[in-house]
Image (cartoon, grey):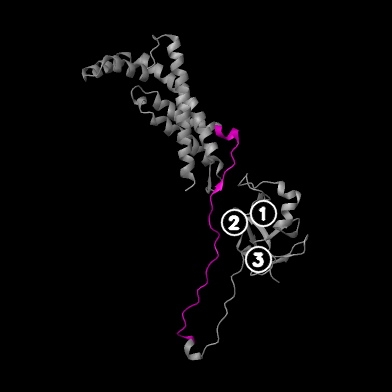
Amino acid sequence: MRCFTHPRSEAVGICSSCNKGVCARCAVEKDGKVYCKACIAKSKFSELKCANHPRSEAVGVCSACKKPICDACAIDKEGRLYCRLCSAELPPEFEVPEPARVAEARPAYEEERLPPARIEEKRIPKMKVELAVKTSETVSSTIFGGIVGGFLMGLPFINLLLIWEVVGGYVAAYLLRLRVDRYSNGYLRSRDAMFAGAISGVFAAFLATFFNIVYAVLFKGMLLQAGDFLLSLGLDVGIVDIIMKTSVTDLTLPAAFIFTKLVATVVLFALLGAVGGAISSELSRK
């Protein structure tokens, strides 16, 4: 019997709804019965979304982990449907047996000179899956990323290199992927990675301001010497003043100026952290 949709493929069963022949690519198991994908799509089952790809409709349920899976995740083995992860973990007795070798009739004197038959192994390609992230799972990673970015951005003069907050956002997204990626074959959506990076940037802004104030109080004399050194290099007094006010939070300045600087720091760090998260998401797809 041939598949109704793919006439060149052998049928592995008959759809319990429309009675059409279905091949391994079309067969979907549900409640111990075989259905074609068209009948499954018409049923209530099509309302489910794939566990790995939330935007894709499920075409079946994995026989091992019972999770709904889409067409890209579905693997047929021995007439049953599995997701790619469970299919790779099945014991040998559940593996599809290799096709038997068919020896051609040849004269006896040619048998010794025949090269050994090659049997191609059927391997399931490893595919990156989109990871589902809950908001509660981002807390620890964003805090750690904020500590990294906040500490580096709190150092006077070194904080003028805004790349440190991009690093903090990258670290936050990277740690988040490690936490939710159980099988090390997934990637974060750009939206989730940028959200984690942005939140770590907000946390880093307050932390950097705190460190900046502490450094300004403890090392006030050294910071003044640094300002004099910049003047000795021939820099304009106005430029040196801007550098000092940007890299150091001086408590002697008006409260309105300090608050405005804090707000600007929060917005800037959130944007830089989101950039770091986006970079981490793109690298995780490769």
x then y, percent, for residue 253: 39, 10
- Identify residue for label 1: 64
Q: Determine whether 187 is above or below 214 in the image.
A: below
Q: Earlier in the sequence, mark 2 or mark 1?
A: 1
Q: Type of residue at label 3?
A: His
Q: Which quarter of the rendered picture does the N terminus lie within?
A: bottom right
Q: Type of residue at label 1?
A: Ala
Q: Is residue 266 visible?
A: yes
x then y, percent, for residue 100: 59, 75
Marks 2/3: CA distance? 29 Å
**Which residue is at 45% across, 35% downward?**
276
Q: Is residue 217 magenta?
A: no
**Which residue is at 62% across, 44% downward?**
55
Classified by dominant secondary structure, the portion drawn in magenta counts as loop
Left or right: where does residue 156 sit relative to residue 67? left
- Identify residue for label 3: 6
Give residue 80's quadrant in the image: bottom right
For numbered disc 3, what is the local secondary structure? loop
The reply to whether callout 3 and callout 1 are in contact (CB within 8 Å) is no
